[in-house]
Image: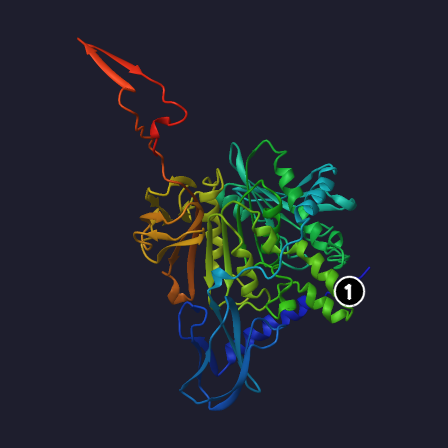
Amino acid sequence: MNNLPNKVPLLCLLLAISTFATHAQSPFVVTTDRADKTYNVNQWMAFDVVADITDSANYEIRFDRYAAPIQQGKIALQAGKTTKIYFKAEEPCALICTVSNNQFSDVEGAVFEPLNITPLEEEPNDFDAFWQESLAELARIPIDPKLSFYEATNYSTTYRLNLGMIDGRRVYGFLSVPKLEGKMPAVVSLPSFGAGPSIVRPVNDIAENIGALALAISIHNAEPDAVDANAYEPDNLTHPKEYYQRYAVLAAIRAIDYFFTRSDFNGSVGLTGVSQGGGLVIMVAGVDKRVAAITFGNPTHSEHSGLRHERATGFPYYFVRAKTAYRDENILQKVAASSKYYDNIYFAKRYKNPAFGVLGYEDQVCPTATSFASFNQLSEKKILLSATKLAHSNPGEYWSLRYDFFRRFLVGADRSPLPYVQAHKGYEIDAGKDTTIHINKPLILNGVAMLRNQTLTQHIQWKKLSGAGEVHFANANALNTNVTFSATGEYTLVLEVRDETLLGTDKFYTLLDRVTITVQPASQDLTLNCPAGSIRVVTREVVAQVNWQTPSVSNACNSQA
């Protein structure tokens, strides 16, 4: 068994701490010449280095810290001046520019057509079969819930909960139940990376703010406030059934199973999590069709094959760890193949319900490009909060906007036992229902984009995602517009709306939804050119007689369509 060393997470933490400290003290700051840090492919851009000192410095532009530098060199800094580093990307990507001297460093992120970032490799042919087999294994284990009181507030009661699991394990967590009558939705909160006693805590805030059963689970085989000495072990990266994260995915699915045994559950379930929790959210949503809405921040487990292509690699860096531990190409090939069963880019395409995510453009733990690769595979309504100056963290409003999102997309999540909650509903985006038209008929598109029931009117764009022919929008920058198609076939259109209200605070929102249009041949109105005498109409008083002579098969009355 090839158990690979698991030292990378500590390096990630040290890097994040180091980056924050030097950024705070650095006498020079790196930024870009666009507030949204967003550029087109093959467009020249500039990283601007504003200095308070006169000195020389080194710079590197990279996809992530494991891939080879794309561009590097030396620059001369002058106090009170701006030094520009010019760069042009040749493909959709996200990257980091690091400027450093002997004592300080600073970083800046930029993205190039990030919504066009696609997976680097194909998924395994038996991806679905693998996970169906795992679900069947879990289904054979009784749920066997064990519930005991933990704590209470005026508005919710929290219990310890543990559930039956494969391999003799248990799923441990805290269940918070709002003090409400009737049936309610449920939310599973999935944990960030770690095994300490503070990783998993009760999420009674979710229970109380949206009126939902709220379950925070551990992925380890110990009480949520205890330490599991065997956390993340075993983790055999050469065999897909022996990845530790298989336990994590099945633990979340077992939590969903439990909700369906409760008489106070209404059948609508959501998932939430950040970092490792965010990665697990996408995995579970792709496997379990019962999931109705998800929120995630800076998700792990995306694009594990990145380093094989000198591109960004997602945490927990399976291939990096394998390459460090082994030089055997056969082992590396096995890791590359096995890790695909835990890559979000393949789970995301299978999830067919609304999603809300946040990505940091300076994230060097879960590189931004890897997160976009997963986000772009989500095919239904999705809302993205781009935090252009954040690393591996989440802006404060993400936590409260989760409530707004669930109120809109989880059935029954608009109740709260709290007397002071403003039950806002979050962003809505709707490109309309899939439909079928004839090629000679224009289609009226009635898009919807709103926040708290206020229509968004700026930064609107209709686009063709796929289809054989050309698409012509009467006004591609209006929610309501006409569209025509040049050829028959199936087309997918995308409605994209940006809310740049918070751009001055280094954040903006992107709303996306798709609609499928099937264009059929022109409708056929049948005209019969029949010979004289085939039809004779004789009127007598108020009665009309029609003598119809059936056309022969040979001439069919020269029918024309």
**Nearest to the observer: residue 360 or residue 23:** 360
Give coordinates of residue 74: x percent, y percent. 52, 87
The residue drawn where x is 49% and y is 61% is 116
Q: Quadrant of residue 558?
A: top left
Which amino acid is tagged 1?
Asn
**Nearest to the observer: residue 240 or residue 205:** 240
Instruction: Locate the C terminus by quadrant.
Output: top left
Give coordinates of residue 533: x percent, y percent. 27, 19
> SS class of the residue under badge 1?
helix
Q: Please determine whether, in this image, residue 380 is positioned above or below residue 557.
A: below
- The answer to whether residue 247 shows anywhere in this view is yes
Residue at the left extreme, as displayed: 541
The residue drawn where x is 59% and y is 62% is 120
Q: Quadrant of residue 322?
A: bottom right
Give coordinates of residue 424: x percent, y percent. 40, 47
Colour scheme used in the picture? rainbow
Pointer 1: what residue?
A: 330
- The answer to whether residue 7 shows anywhere in this view is no
Instruction: Locate the N terminus by quadrant.
Output: bottom right
The residue drawn where x is 57% and y is 66% is 367
Q: Please determine whether, in this image, residue 440 is positioned above or below residue 222.
A: above
Q: Please determine whether, in this image, residue 86 is positioned above or below residue 210.
A: below
In this picture, residue 477 sits left or right of residue 228: left
**Nearest to the observer: residue 386 or residue 110:** 110
Q: Residues within 10 Å of mark 1 (few under 14, many from 20)?
A: few
In this picture, residue 294 sits left or right of residue 539: right
Q: How many discs appear?
A: 1
Give coordinates of residue 312: x percent, y percent. 59, 67
